[in-house]
Amino acid sequence: MSCLKKIKIIKPDDWHVHLRDEKILKKILRYTEMFYQRAIIMPNLNQPIIDYKKAIFYKHRIINATQLNTKFEPLMICYLTKETCLKELQYGFLRNIFIGAKLYPNQSTTNSNTGISKISEIFHVLELMQKMKMPLLIHGEESNINIDIYDREAKFIETTMIPLRKTFPELKIILEHITTKEAVDYIEENNSSYLAGTITPHHLMLNRNNMFINGIQPNLYCLPILKRKVHQNALRKAISNGSTRFFLGSDSAPHLYKHKINIFGCAGIFNAPSSLLCYITVFEEMKALKHFESFCSKNGPNFYNLPINQKTITLIKKPYKILKKISIGKDFIMPFLSGETLEWSIL
Ligand code: NCD
Ligand code: ZN
């Protein structure tokens, strides 16, 4: 009889993932499907998902690329631009094509060059979203290159979030992939049913020093960038105290190895093969396993007003070796923690 430690939880959802398209989509989707029942699919393709027709076609391409027969459900998001059409957005939301819309500050991250330069440009859109109770997902960083890269999230809260929430107090906002103590404090202090945050596995496991151990590690370059250890600790504490305002968003963001190891290397960490196992590792280290299921499977749907999944999955304390690379034609992608072994696996 096996006496390995096991944990059975409601099958989680990933509230922030990049699946890309075509060859990459076909190769990586199975990892998200394996661990997650639903996922919010980021709209920052090379041709961003800016209208409901694009979203419908992209959703079909994703469903056609599924491999595991898990009835995986992609949840689509509209990429906001200064040209976003109110009628389009309203139709997309009321017809359940979009479950939310995403604000990328202009030039803040991958494919954000059609993002928003000045938030007042889209106040009419935000007003409609508030009225329709349509969630707004935010990449919360100032994109001004004169602001230190390590301060851009804290600065965004001060100069954009606080005034924005005064103007639209009933707009449902998810501050995505938070990385700082300032963001944790801001969400906790507000303890509002209109504000939540997602946290990635890499920001829980690492801090900015990790990017420079044994030489520069481009695989650990992501945006928002890894921060100091005090911030990492604030995130770890936030998930351990069981607050329902934080939930899972892996920000798994694959780039071909040749685009990461490049003179202008891309930001993004591909963690889909291990994200859930990384999260459980951290919850166990923090002696907070009792809050693990809520973080993965309940807080997200409760915030988005969606049903909680019926299926369950079981994680087991048994070594799990993360694959070294995933080939994509002649190229390949190197996953987060490539070739390393975690203590948890999926049954
Ligand atoms: C993401 C990507 O590559 O699309 N990169 C990242 O570092 N997280 C974009 C994003 O979510 O910022
Ligand atoms: Zn992302």
Image (tube, rainbow, N blue to C red):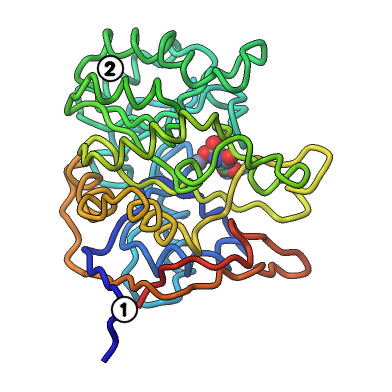
Q: Amino acid at mark 2?
A: Glu
Name the image quarter holding residue 175.
top left
The numbered mark at residue 127 is 2
Q: Residues within 10 Å of mark 2 (few under 14, many from 20)?
A: some
> In the image, is 142 to the left or to the right of 194?
right
* Quarter of the view holding residue 181: top left
Residue 72 place in picture, x, y as percent: 34, 65
Q: Quadrant of residue 12?
A: bottom left
Nearest to the observer: residue 263 or residue 60: 263
Give the residue drawn at x 57%, y 54%. 270
Helix, strand or loop at disc 2? helix
Percent of width and height locating residue 213: 70, 44
The foreground one among 26 and 4 is 4
Image coordinates of residue 127 in percent, x first then y, are 27, 17
Residue bearing the label numbered 1? 4
Check contact, mark 1 vs mark 2: CB within 8 A. Answer: no
Residue visible at 31% across and 78% down in the picture: 4
Identify residue type, mark 1: Leu
Give the mark, 1 or 2, whose residue is nearer the N terminus: 1
Residue at coordinates 63% horizontally, 16% vertically from top-left? Answer: 148
What is the secondary structure assignment of the residue under circle 1? loop
Quadrant holding the C terminus: bottom left
In front: label 1 or label 2 = 1
